[in-house]
Amino acid sequence: MTATDLALHAGAHAPLGTSPYPLSPSNPGPVEGFQPSVDGLHDLPADLQPIRDKVLRGERLDLDDGRALFATPDLNGLGALANYVNECRNGNRTTFTYNRHLNYTNKCAYRCMFCAFRRDGDEHDAVVMDMDFIRHKLRTEFTDTMKEVHVVGGINVDLPYSYYLDLLRTIKDERPNLHVKGFTMIELDQIAEQAGRPIEEVLEELKAAGLDSCPGGGAEVLSKRVHKKLYNGKLPPEQWLSTVRKAHAAGLRTNATMLFGHIETTDERLDHMLQIRAVQDETGGFMQYIPLVFHPDNTPLQRLGKTTGTDALRTIAVGRLMLDNMPHVKAYWVMLGIKIAQIALHYGADDIDGTVVEEHITHDAGATTPQGLATTQIAGLIAETGRQAVLRDTLYQDLSVI
């Protein structure tokens, strides 16, 4: 069966090689002459053929489709389908950014069972960065060409509202060209509580102080059952969704994450994706979907063991197919490991994060990946997969082929 025959068999409304879903400024489609690969789509098993045909027609997948994708024994067929959708939207590009993390505190009021990062505050390795320390760090460890700083920390109830404004102003004062991607929805909720004001007002003040966008952490899995068992004191799913809607309404783009590989079920993963998809339909504020592999070491859940590479690849591919309105899917190399992240670039992922340079949250939980990679190293890792490495800014408005 040829590519044309495949399209006709599926009843596709557009020829193969065009996107089955609407593109966006950050998804300009393949460059002229590039044809998305249909390898592996012609002889899919019976359980995947109806889903393939829906994908080729540009139809939205439902919960039952997602169940079939997670259940199929044909991992390579699943990957081929996700890869096709990715290449329709992004061609042969894989993006990354020149960034650095800044974890301003690890003191945290919560005791989430999956976290090895948090401290009570009286330990020898407890951290609360003051502005002088942050200013020195920005001057000595950041560069003029760096594009993004990723700012997250624990829920430290001792920090006043003014701390967060000072933090943002200090970053912008020292590195005015640096994009500040800061504060999860959990942090934003706590910051508003410290301010004693509506979060809508606080978001505007944070933006004025230098906040440019927000990461997606803190959602974990949007399941009341999992929330109750693993992080009961934390922001509940419905409040996380409410807060992210408010962030989008304030003009802040965010990411959407899912922490998987602990006690969640397949249906809970899919429900998480569907809730994220619904918010994206409503607001259009998500830039990336980032499946985060759970690392159990040094946590109360260490007995669960580590997530397999096949489960990670399957979850990435399913996310690409279910989240048809999400511009980008990230293979976060810090959590996946470099080798699995490379393979994921042919299982639906089109972004590999960035240089990172200094990462504590995952490494405290036993990650063995490097603390950071140089831009040349990342470009080389991407090139090894046959993809074209493209350096981006946070909002995908500045793209440079490497």
Image (cartoon, grey):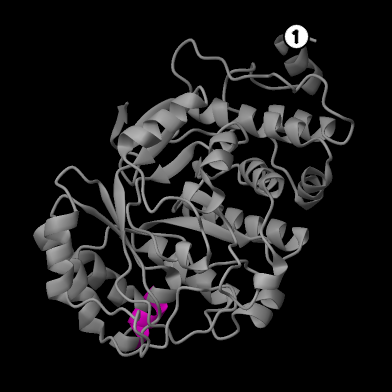
The local crowd at label 1, few if under 14, some if 14 to 19, many if 20 or more residues have their Cα within 10 Å, is few
Task: Give x and y (percent) for residue 240.
Answer: 52, 72
Report the predominant secondary structure element of the magenta stretch. Answer: helix
Q: Which residue is mark 1?
A: 2
Q: Residue at 36% across / 77% down in the picture?
A: 199
Q: Residue at 53% across / 58% down in the picture?
A: 257
Q: Where 274 sits versus 53, above or below?
A: below
Task: Give x and y (percent) for residue 233.
Answer: 55, 86
The answer to whether residue 162 is seen in the rendering is yes
Task: Give x and y (percent) for residue 12.
Answer: 71, 22
Q: Where 269 sits versus 391, above or below?
A: below
Horizontal relation, residue 83 to residue 27: left or right: right
Q: Where 278 sits versus 119, above or below?
A: above
Q: Residue at 83% across / 41% down in the picture?
A: 72
Q: Nearer the viewer, residue 156 or 358?
A: 358
189 in magenta:
yes
Q: From which residue to which does the magenta span run?
A: 188-193
Horizontal relation, residue 68 to residue 269: left or right: right
Q: Residue at 36% across / 49% down in the picture?
A: 372
The answer to whether residue 54 is seen in the rendering is no
25 in magenta:
no
- Residue 174's image quarter? bottom left
Q: Nearer the viewer, residue 242 or 384?
A: 384
Q: Nearer the viewer, residue 68 or 283?
A: 68
Horizontal relation, residue 247 to residue 279: left or right: left
Looking at the rendered image, the quarter that the C terminus falls into is top left
